[in-house]
Image (cartoon, rainbow, N blue to C red):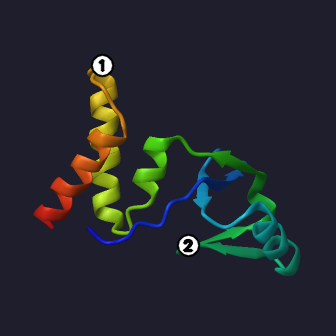
Amino acid sequence: MNDLKIYKELTYIICKDWEIFETPATLEQVEELFNKSDSYIKIGDVMIMKSDIKRIQRKKLSDVEQVIYSIEDKTIRKQVQEEMIDRIKKWMRVNVEIISNLVSKYQQDA
């Protein structure tokens, strides 16, 4: 497996319609971008109107979330997240080892 970039913290951008965007950029970087832009800021592949933003906050990630967000392939990340949610609904264990195994499984299938 390739080296994974580990995120310890993400910045959440919460809009007035309660849609949430997440970015590995620091709160300070998002603040700087927010202050420099005229009316829109770009987060990933989405443009957000500044007036639609309700709150910007940091979120510390759990060990499991760190593994999930380290997955660069978005389709694999989505599959792992869905599997994790399904396991939680079924009251099954979810830990770093299980998530790592799921990542390996989906990477082999890809």
Q: Is residue 17 visible?
A: no
Q: In the figure, is residue 38 to the left or right of 71?
A: right
Q: Quadrant of residue 7?
A: bottom right
Q: Position of residue 104 (x, y in %)?
A: 21, 56
Labels 2, 1: front one = 1
Q: Looking at the rendering, in which quadrant would you find the C terminus?
A: bottom left
- Identify the residue at horizontal 84%, vertical 74% (top origin): 32
Q: Position of residue 75 (x, y in %)?
A: 30, 63
Q: Quadrant of residue 47?
A: bottom right
Q: Quadrant of residue 33?
A: bottom right
Q: Position of residue 90 (x, y in %)?
A: 26, 21
Q: In the figure, is residue 19 to the left or right of 89?
A: right
Q: Looking at the rendering, in which quadrant would you find the N terminus?
A: bottom left
Kind of residue sitting beneath label 1: Trp
Q: Secondary structure at mark 2?
A: loop
- Identify the residue at horizontal 66%, vertical 67% (top origin): 25
* 84 shown above or below 43: above
Q: Secondary structure at mark 1?
A: loop
Query: Which residue sits furthest right?
Result: 35
- Identify the residue at horizontal 46%, vertical 57% (top origin): 69
Residue that mark 1 sits on: 91
Numbered label attached to residue 44: 2
Kind of residue sitting beneath label 2: Gly
